[in-house]
Structure formats: structure tokens, C-alpha cells
Amino acid sequence: MERKKWVRNCPLFRGIPEEEMEILLKRIKACTRIYQKDEILLNVGDTVRSFGIVASGELFVMKEEYSGSTAMVAQILSGELFAEAFAAGEACATVTVMAADKTEVLWIDYRAMTETCPDSPAHKILMKNMMQILARKNLFLTGRISHLSRRTLREKVLSYLSEQALKEGKKSFEIPFDRQGLADYLAADRSALSAVLGKLKKEGVLSFRKNQFELLKEEEQIKI
Amino acid sequence: MERKKWVRNCPLFRGIPEEEMEILLKRIKACTRIYQKDEILLNVGDTVRSFGIVASGELFVMKEEYSGSTAMVAQILSGELFAEAFAAGEACATVTVMAADKTEVLWIDYRAMTETCPDSPAHKILMKNMMQILARKNLFLTGRISHLSRRTLREKVLSYLSEQALKEGKKSFEIPFDRQGLADYLAADRSALSAVLGKLKKEGVLSFRKNQFELLKEEEQIKI
DNA sequence: AAGAATCGGTTGTAATTACAACGGAGGTAG
DNA sequence: CTACCTCCGTTGTAATTACAACCGATTCTT
């Protein structure tokens, strides 16, 4: 029962009693496989009939640009899902998934999960969890788009920071990015971001030290 | 049985036999309501326990910027869902939904749909359809982000057009936007977009007339 | 402690874009 | 036909940003 450790903090299985897990996993044709570092789990164009959950290790999700180069667009940590949107959307993969380390993956057959699985309370919870995961990813993506849609970097930054302040409920809050991470999230150059942050600080709109930010002028948020 | 008309092309009910609809709708506590033009269906901050489907008419989804102004971020047409991500994600509304015309809406109680509803083949199809809708929206949002993440407008445009060409499988294809719509989608100024398109045409990278585009130089897509 | 690496701010320059304003093409209504 | 409207390309200017390069501070390693 190595499983308990990571299953417990896997959002897909939240609320499902431990004793029902074994039979549930069998019914949805779950199977584990271990991948070595740099091994490819999924290729662009692949038909996706299963989605995966990282049990241990780490995955990279990479997108091949039409320039030929590949960019890392996400990393999947323990307990997180991947390829679930392709499986549920009945779409081919548009990304490549690669093992960042030696990684154990639990694969779940999507059709088995949605169609052939007999009814049970555990299964109902599973389906609801799956929808919640898809929905929350939706909300996250929509939020990011609302920032990316701003015309200037200054507006992107303020849009993001205002949302964070709102989410925290305080004017002082911590962000989960370093500068490069925030620049990537906002699709901007790191040094340009630094310049904008410095300007906002000099104007007295906000203050920050490392990842700790504070919005100072309420009116400035309004006057964009 | 006015219902048939729009239920038939509603993705949420696709594959469910007509004769099972009535009992299914009762089980998920579906109820219709008619809204007059400009009436508010959902406000920012509302707790969302139901999601809706437009039976007839049209809705506007609006986001209040922290500037105080409101921007239209989507319109919901007949057969389409709204607020499903908030309901499934168990989140409060971050947008306002307003009737653009006199609009009939079918509300579905999310908890009834996922928990209290007894099992049936129709219900299984419903759940799968719901997941497919959420997943496809996910893919759509991810695609848009991949365009918005480009640093220059030229790259955004080529990223978008390349994806469209790939999707169509041809180098000549039609896009579903007018210029202003494409500019909004790419979060850019319309005249700037026109300028970039003109430059690309002059360089021989692509040709276009109205919404009909053609990518000409394969290498140019690569050399970005 | 020395060296290496990472992170973040600064500078300068060239390129890009936002923005406002204008005008022409094409469609529509009167 | 004329007036009007929408859509789209063009122009000019000011502002913004990407990009490269550099440097100081901090952290980590050995």
C-alpha cells in the first residue's frame, strides 16, 4: 500500500474512502508504469484514450512551436493530472509530455471511467472530482487570459496583482512566482517587468520586497 | 414540446434519446425562466449552485475591470452553456451575465446533477457530455493563451494563423473573426493588426482577402 | 572563505505597438 | 442617387517594450 501517501492529496480521489479505492481503480482500468528520466509519455498528435496522474517524480509538458523549438509550458508534480483535457475532450495531443525525473504514473482509461464503470458512490465522487478539476483549470486559464489581454505590461502587472490582493483579501500578499516566473506568466520580458515594477514603486502605487507585495493607492488601481 | 428545436443542438444533451429527456430534466431539477433584455442573471460574487443553457435569445458575459468599466468578454448563444465552470468548480462568479435580448434560460441544479440524481444511461451520457464541454473549453483557452504568450503581434498573428491552417489541414482557410474580432482575440489594436497583416502580405508570407487567408512560405512560419 | 550560480535591477538602443485621426470601399436604407 | 454606416487600411507620433549586456546582492557549494 505504497499508494496511500500520494492518493491522499490527489484531488481526483478526494473524498473516496480508502477501502473502496482498490476496487474502484480496478474498475477504471487503472495501471501504473514507471518512466525513466527523459522518457516520452505522450507525443504531439497522439490519440489520447487515457489520462495520467503523477504518483512520484515529475513531468514536463512541452509545446513544439512552429519555429521548431520546444518550450516548457507546465510541470506536473505528484498528485496532479495530465492529458485529462485531451482524454475528456476526445482530442489529439497538442503537447509532448516527458519525464523530468524517474517518475511513476497511474494511467486511467477514460472510457472505462465514464462508460463501462458500474455505478457506485465512489464512482460518483470520482466523476464530480474530475469535473471540478476541469472546471477549476478553466477558471485559472480564464484568469490568466484576463491579465494577458491587457495592452501594456503595466496594466498586466496591476491586473494580476489586484487579483492576488482580492484573492488574499488583504493589500499585502505574497505571489507564487519569482520575477522570471511572473514575466513568463504575463508573457513579458523579465527586465521590462523589473522596470515596470520599479516605476510603480517610485510612483508610490505599490511596494514590494522579493515576493511580498503591497498595493498602496486604491485610486491608482482605479485610474488605469 | 417547443424544446426539441434547441435541445437537439445542445452539446450537453447530445446522444440522449428524446423520450428520456423529460424524466432526466426533472431529475436534475431543470427549470426554465425568461429574462427581459438587460436583465441581470448573475452578478460578480454570487454563489453559483446552478448553471444555465440558453434556449433562445442571447446573453452577454461581462467582466468588471478594476478600472470600474465593464468589458464584454463573451456572448452566449442558443444551446450554449454559461456559469458551468463556477458551478462545477464550486467558485463564486467573477463575471456578470446579462440578457442581450429577451432570452429563455434552462437552469440546471449542479448538485442534483452530480449527486442526487439516480443512475441511468441518460445520466451517464449527460455527465460525459459535461466533461467534454469543460475539457474542450480548456483546450480552447489553452490555445488562446499560446497565441497571447507571444512577444510581438507579428508572432501572435502567425501563431494563430498557423494553428488555423493546421486545423483546416490546408494552407488556405477562413477565420471566424473580422479584423476587430481578431484584434480582440489577440489582445491588440486593430490598426496595429492591419499594419502587421499588410507587412506580412508585402513580404509574401501570406495573402488574404477579407476572412480568407493563405499561408505562402512554409519557411517563414519556421523562421519566427 | 572562495568560487559559482542564481536572482533581480539598471542601462541603452532598436523595434514594436498603442492611439488617434483620416479616408476609401462596400453595403444598406431612404 | 444620396446619405449613412460599417469595415478596414494608412499615417504619424508618442509611448512602451524586447533584447542584450552588465552588475550587485544573495545563496549555495566545496
Image (cartoon, coloured by chain):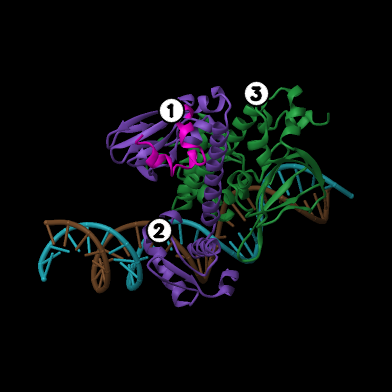
Chain colours: A purple, B green, C cyan, D brown
**In the picture, residue D23 is in which quadrant?**
bottom left
**Residue B157 image offset from top left, x and y in percent:** 50, 46
Query: In this image, C14 relative to A11: left or right?
Result: left
- Under mark 1, the amino acid is Ala
**Residue B14 image offset from top left, x and y in percent:** 67, 27
- Under mark 3, the amino acid is Pro
Which residue was labeled with disc 3?
A: B121
Q: Nearer the viewer, residue C23 or B159?
A: B159
* Residues at marks 1 and 3, CA–CA distance in whole angstroms: 23 Å
Is residue B98 shown in magenta? no
Query: In this image, B100 relative to A128: left or right?
Result: right
Which residue was labeled with disc 2?
A: A177
Query: In the rendered image of this protein, does residue A161 appear above or below residue B169?
Result: below
Query: In the rendered image of this protein, does residue A222 appear above or below residue A40?
Result: below
Which residue was labeled with disc 1?
A: A30
* Residues at marks 1 and 2, CA–CA distance in whole angstroms: 34 Å
Q: Regarding mark 3 in the picture, which secondary structure is present there? A: helix
Residue at image location 58% in from the left, 35% down from the top: B131
Confirm whether residue B183 shows in the render.
Answer: yes
Q: Give the range drawn in magenta.
A: A1-24
Query: In the rendered image of this protein, does residue A30 appear above or below residue A154?
Result: above
**Residue A204 image offset from top left, x and y in percent:** 48, 77
* Residues at marks 2 and 3, CA–CA distance in whole angstroms: 45 Å
